């Protein structure tokens, strides 16, 4: 007996229940962004971002649906031609019959979304949103904060972040008396949550990346700020999402992108001895 075919619409419906659109930020662009709801899905690829590399991988793997954290298109496109990288990728995807779904900030804030996963990964307890949404029926919000069971020294904290994010180093603004017990987190480029972490009384705040002035603000406010990188703060969650989709739809094949990499890398000067 052949299993019932799975449609793009069924996968979209599941993703909407997991990361509801009402949780997305106003400026965002989420949901099914390219494709046909009635299309049949046999193979799905999850990734952090649609790039020329992930488009090529999706075409080579003959997937029918990409679930990408970051939206494509994000901003409105006036033309869909090969005169821009985004236009060329949209054309390639449409020509190959590949649909694109992006949960983005609804995935950040979902009950079991990226920020919740990050808070659990870092061992926080009593986890609550940093920026609660007004009148949300499930008391959800953006970012998370909570408590470490045992206070960490700065060295212990850095070692833990490197271990959990599988990175060999990170940027840090260290508070003078860096004992860390209360921690705020927000994935991606979320320096705008620093104030909420300070208001919550956090000793430390973790976001993927931020700008220089937010780093100066952290220093002046004496809160430890750790920046493990945008990629490290989010990529693990698209791997978890592939696993979750696979468990939900056992008749299709769901895998994370294997060609996607962090465009940034650490380089050390190669000083002759
Ligand atoms: Zn991001």
Image: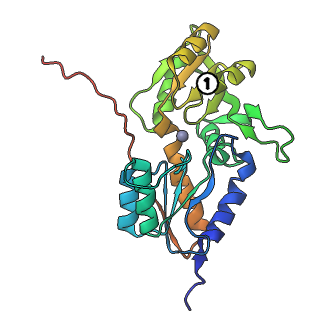
268 w.r.t. 77: above or below: above
Taking 152 as reference, is 8 above or below it? below
Q: Which residue sits at x=62%, y=10%?
A: 222
Q: Is residue 219 visible?
A: yes
Q: Quadrant of residue 187?
A: top right
SS of the residue at dot 1?
strand
- Image height of 18 relative to 122, above or below: below
In front of the other: 113 or 21: 21
Q: How is the image coloured?
A: rainbow
Query: 262 or 53, which lies in front?
Result: 53
Q: Which residue is tagged 1?
A: 205
Q: Residue at x 77, y 42 (%)?
A: 140
Q: Quadrant of the N terminus?
A: bottom right
Residue drawn where x is 69% and y is 65% of the image: 13
Looking at this rendering, what residue extends furthest in the front direction? 78
Q: Nearer the viewer, residue 53 or 259?
A: 53
Q: Residue furthest left?
A: 273
Q: Is residue 266 left or right of residue 194?
A: left
| Residue 203 percent coordinates (x, y) | 65, 18
The residue lying at 39 percent from left, 48 percent from top is 85
Residue 212 placed where, x, y %? 50, 17
Position of the C terminus by quadrant: top left
Q: Is 15 on the left or on the right of 97, as rendered? A: right
Q: Is mark 1 within 8 Å of ligand 1?
A: no
Q: Taking the image as drawn, is residue 257 in sight?
A: no
x and y percentages locating residue 186 in the rendered image:
62, 33
Quarter containing ligand 1?
Answer: top right
Image mark count? 1
Report crowding for label 1: few under 14, some 14 to 19, many 20 or more residues within 10 A (C-alpha). Answer: many
């Amino acid at each position: 007996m052949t299993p019932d075919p799975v449609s793009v619409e069924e996968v979209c419906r599941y993703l909407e229940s997991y990361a509801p659109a009402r949780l997305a930020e106003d400026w965002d662009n989420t949901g099914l962004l390219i494709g046909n709801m009635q299309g049949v899905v046999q193979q799905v690829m999850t990734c952090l971002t649609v790039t020329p590399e992930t488009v090529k991988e999706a075409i080579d793997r003959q997937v029918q649906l990409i679930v990408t954290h970051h939206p494509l298109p994000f901003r409105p496109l006036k033309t869909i031609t090969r005169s821009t990288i985004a236009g060329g990728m949209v054309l390639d995807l449409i020509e190959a019959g590949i649909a694109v779904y992006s949960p983005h900030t609804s995935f950040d804030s979902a009950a079991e979304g990226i920020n919740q996963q990050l808070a659990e990964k870092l061992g926080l307890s009593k986890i609550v949103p940093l920026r609660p949404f007004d009148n949300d029926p499930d008391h959800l919000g953006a970012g998370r904060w909570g408590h470490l069971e045992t206070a960490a020294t700065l060295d212990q904290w850095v070692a833990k972040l490197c271990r959990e994010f599988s990175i060999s180093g990170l940027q840090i603004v260290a508070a003078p008396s860096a004992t860390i017990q209360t921690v705020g987190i927000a994935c991606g480029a979320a320096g705008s949550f620093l104030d909420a972490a300070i208001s919550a009384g956090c000793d430390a705040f973790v976001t993927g990346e931020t700008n220089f002035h937010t780093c100066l603000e952290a220093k002046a406010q004496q809160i430890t700020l750790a920046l493990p990188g945008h990629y490290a703060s989010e990529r693990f969650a698209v791997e978890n999402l592939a696993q979750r989709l696979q468990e939900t739809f056992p008749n299709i094949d769901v895998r994370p992108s294997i060609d996607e990499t962090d465009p940034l890398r650490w380089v050390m000067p190669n000083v002759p001895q």
